[in-house]
Image: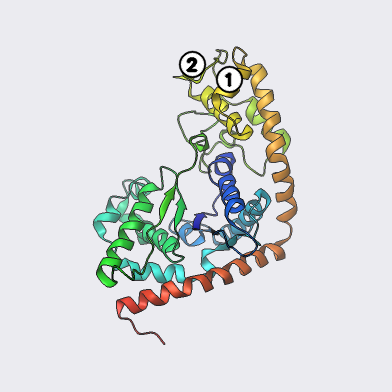
Amino acid sequence: MRIVSGIQPTGSLHLGNYLGAIRNWVRMQDDLATGNGDNGQCLFFLADLHAISMPHEPAALHAATLEMTAVLTACGIDSSRSILFNQAQVPAHAELQWLLNGTARMGWLNRMTQWKDKAGKNREGASAALFTYPVLQAADVLLYQATHVPVGDDQRQHLELARDIAQKFNNDFATEDAPVFTLPEAITPPAAARIMSLRDGSKKMSKSDPSEMSRIELADDADAMAQKIKKAKTDPEPLPSEVAGLEGRPEALNLVTIYSALADTTPDAVLSQFGGQGFGAFKPALAELLVETLGPVRDRFVELRQDREMLDAILARGAAQARELGVPTLDATYKALGLVRG
């Protein structure tokens, strides 16, 4: 079993990233990776090549890549048990993308929902990289013969595209007995992983929201976390004793969901404890649990981000491992296409 997943180093990581992806990464690492990788392998990468599909500041991108390395390490990603690297240090990602561009179809890319959302009405002004980055996403996982990829609802379409590209390539250029690419399966995160904005319970918590009060950032100190929970949007009604009573109350549901995810329990279990109480009692309890959970992560992050030499070393070591793993697939792809390399 080989799991591959990536995250763009843009903006500060927040609670939604932690509960929706990073904590799951750590658990998958702990379940799979041993000292010699006998039980499986995890590759986690910082998608800096994807980041240049949108306008960006080069210096900010470089700094964000190192900071995100520090955050992931603080959260529990162990570079001695998982492979942690950034795309730009593994040229095979971009190389394989170009080779797969001959198999991907314009119609497939035109149907990508995120392309439509990010390009908006100015599709003619969008970069070619924004249009083709789902092919790079396919290369990201196919390069390593990933068996499984953690995906949320917003990325499921892209994994299906990766499978379509892999299947068509295998059909066109390989044999059934010796396919070039493995078709990766999806790992779906738990339902509790969908964390919404603290200011609007109908919108997903996001790095791009202009209001810092809409999200808990992993770099927030204890006071900032507590203040954001205190000021989170709610309603005047007390908490019900069952989840069904939260229907039509998205902000209340979101706070209960956050508590249950942090406590590794169910929303019903949370409501059995706090049902009938108002947010004046629930919010302080939530803030305390949040600080207890994320406080050590934040402290470790502050320590790690000062050691740029160590962060560079983590990425360099992971990139070297990733480059070695990707060689057989890249060689097989060139050979299948009839391309001659020196």
Q: Quadrant of residue 37?
A: bottom right
The circle drawn on residue 271 is 1
Q: In which quarter of the image is residue 34?
A: bottom right
Distance from the alpha carbon under mark 1 to that under mark 2: 10 Å
Residue 302 location, x and y as percent? 73, 50
Q: Do the residues labelled 1 and 2 touch (CB within 8 Å)?
A: yes
Q: Which amino acid does label 1 sit on?
A: Leu
Residue 248 location, x and y as percent? 44, 19
Residue 288 location, x and y as percent? 71, 29
Label 2 Cα neighbours within 10 Å, binned few <14 / some 14-19 / many ≥20: few
Q: Disc 1 on helix, strand or loop? A: helix
Residue 170 seen in this snapshot = yes
Label 1 Cα neighbours within 10 Å, binned few <14 / some 14-19 / many ≥20: some
- Between disc 1 and disc 2, whose residue precedes? 2
Q: What residue type is labelled 2?
A: Gly
- Residue 129 shown left or right of residue 207 in the figure: left
Residue at the (36%, 74%) spot, across then down: 333
Q: Which residue matches tag 2? A: 245
Residue 57 location, x and y as percent? 53, 58
